[in-house]
Image: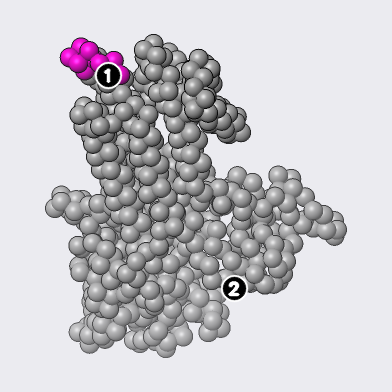
Amino acid sequence: MGKMKKVHIVIISGILLLIALVMYWLNLGVWKNTVLITTTFIAGWSIANKAIQSARMKAFSIELLVTIAVIGALMIGEYVESAAVTFLFIFGAYLEARTLEKTRSSLKTLIDMAPLEATVLKDGERVILPVEEIKQGDHILIQSGEKIAIDGKIVSGKALINEATITGESVPAAKNIDDLVFSGTIIDNGYIEVEAQKVGDDTAFAKIIELVEEAQEAKAKTQKFLERFANLYTPAIIILSIIVFIITHNIELAITFLVIACPGALVISAPVSLVAGIGNGARNGTLIKGGEVMENFAKVNAVVFDKTGTLTEGKPSVTNIKSFGMDEEALLKITAEAELISEHHLGQTIVKEAKDRGVSLTNEATDFTVEKGHGLYATVASNKVVIGNRKLLSKNNISLDMSIDQFAIQEEKNGNTAIFVGVNNKVAGIISIADQVRQEAVDTIRQLKAAGVEQTIMLTGDNKHTAEKVAAQLGIDTVFAEMLPEDKVNHIKRLQNEGYRVAMVGDGINDAPAIALADVGLAMGAAGTDVAMETADVVLMSDKLNRIPYAYSLAKATIRNMKQNMFFAIVAVSLLLVGVLVGKVFLASGMLIHELSVLIVILNAIRLVRYKQRNK
């Protein structure tokens, strides 16, 4: 039934009820009953139609119970009751549908923000095209106030861009040449030309909408239980109504019992809360993938963090170079030449430092071998080079003098990662690298503990001294250093065996095994990262740690809201049934209270749409 048609039926039925009331005052009994029966058929047609459809599918729906009750009321001549019940039912259903739309308003807001057209540069001419006709490689021109229609890289110009639709952050981000921009974001100020890399359904914005739609359809365990319960509860109510009639011989009481016991508010109590909570998260740059994830996240009491790129900025820099037996530039040159083809972020940092200092990298490394979690070997200009940690030096029988080790320990205690460089079986130097701790990291840990997290743990491949310094700085409870990826997995298992419900926070790629194993996996800075968006349970689109306590508090608030709804629905039905059995609640008034209870459940869920984190 379309929305307008439903409105028309509600209005016509309401007017007919008023006409019946006037006829009652004029003492036109026959005409009054005729109007009431007409009202019953007009308002009850769609209800009976749905009841027949559900009966054909061997399902017991609330419409079936109402239809049985209305037929019974007509048979015993209770035309006022039959007309009032059908009118109240469709009026309540209309209000429910309108109110439920508000719980999905976050998703609708997102969809409404999708751009429809863009200015494309074609053969030097500016052409406005629908987004469906834009192809990869097209150059798009965007100016102040316009929405970006594609994901791509800036090739000219600069701008301040509001990325709230993607990251939830309302503070505009400064973007320059070679920076990535995303569909659905808006240029606050500036002018840019962008080369399209992802268009249509491949953009991050389209994937967000798709994920939120899937998440809102994914059912929680509680929701699945309630649906199974309703399938058993509804036929049980029909049997109980028959028993009530057999005992009391009161058909009106039996019909009223049948209608009032409908589990409408209980069945809807879980999905409305989850839809509203998931929508709120999406609007604030946090994708929570479904009701079951929401339930699991609310139960989390231990949060495990990766260090580099999660608790730290992920932008390491060289802070010191100490050479032994060669000058600093020669040490940096041979190390950078060995690291040139390495993909490790520390290796890339050393190469960048060499280039920034104008060191010419002329030799090509051969025999390049990576020792996972420890470092690498390579041959550079006939020199055998070993770059990595103490374990790698020991494995290659390279002795470490006490004075050199003390220097390295002091660097590590100062928060640096000490990279040992061995050349031809001797320690040639130490390159110190540091990564800045994120400004919001301390508050994030504090807020998580305030929200109920009992244990915060840091697992890092970095050295013990640096790891302990960062952990102490942030107030993290437990730290484990020099971890390989498989070690992180084992620690997640250990925590779960100890009874903790564990959330793992990482970048979604390097920590993928630990994220997959945890009860809830969170990936940060996932905008434009398809792998992270696919693998994590909770996707944080921005690169801000403070989205984690927000998402955690939102999950707890959503589950709390769901439990409130379930409690209210059970209490309402129980009180109504008691009222029916003691003769204080009748069919029409019971139906009115029943529909009000459904509306109250929905209105309670709508509070989540406007939820904001407290106690920041």
Residue 394, image x and y in percent?
Answer: 23, 70
Q: Nearer the viewer, residue 218 or 324?
A: 218
Residue 520, image x and y in percent?
Answer: 31, 51
Callout 2: SS:
strand
Please, is residue 234 above or below residue 184 in the view? above
Quadrant assignment, res 7: top right
| Residue 421 shown left or right of residue 528 in the figure | left
The structure residue drawn at horizontal position 33% and vertical position 59%, both measured from the top left corner, is 553
Please, is residue 19 above or below residue 375 in the view? above
Kindly identify which numbered label has been placed on residue 254: 1
Q: Is residue 233 visible?
A: yes
Mark 1 vs mark 2, CA separation in Å: 69 Å
Q: Residue furthest left?
A: 498
Please, is residue 43 above or below residue 303 in the view? above
**Please, what is the three-letter code of the amino acid marked with disc 2?**
Ala
The structure residue drawn at horizontal position 85% and vertical position 58%, both measured from the top left corner, is 125
Stretch of the chain drawn in magenta:
243-252
Q: Dot 1, how many residues are within 10 Å of its Cα: few (below 14), some (14-19), or many (20+)?
A: many
**Please, what is the three-letter code of the amino acid marked with disc 1?**
Ala
Q: Are marks 1 and 2 in contact (CB under 8 Å)?
A: no
Q: Nearer the viewer, residue 459 or 51?
A: 51
Q: Nearer the viewer, residue 573 or 33?
A: 33
How many marks can you see? 2
Residue 261, image x and y in percent?
Answer: 29, 28
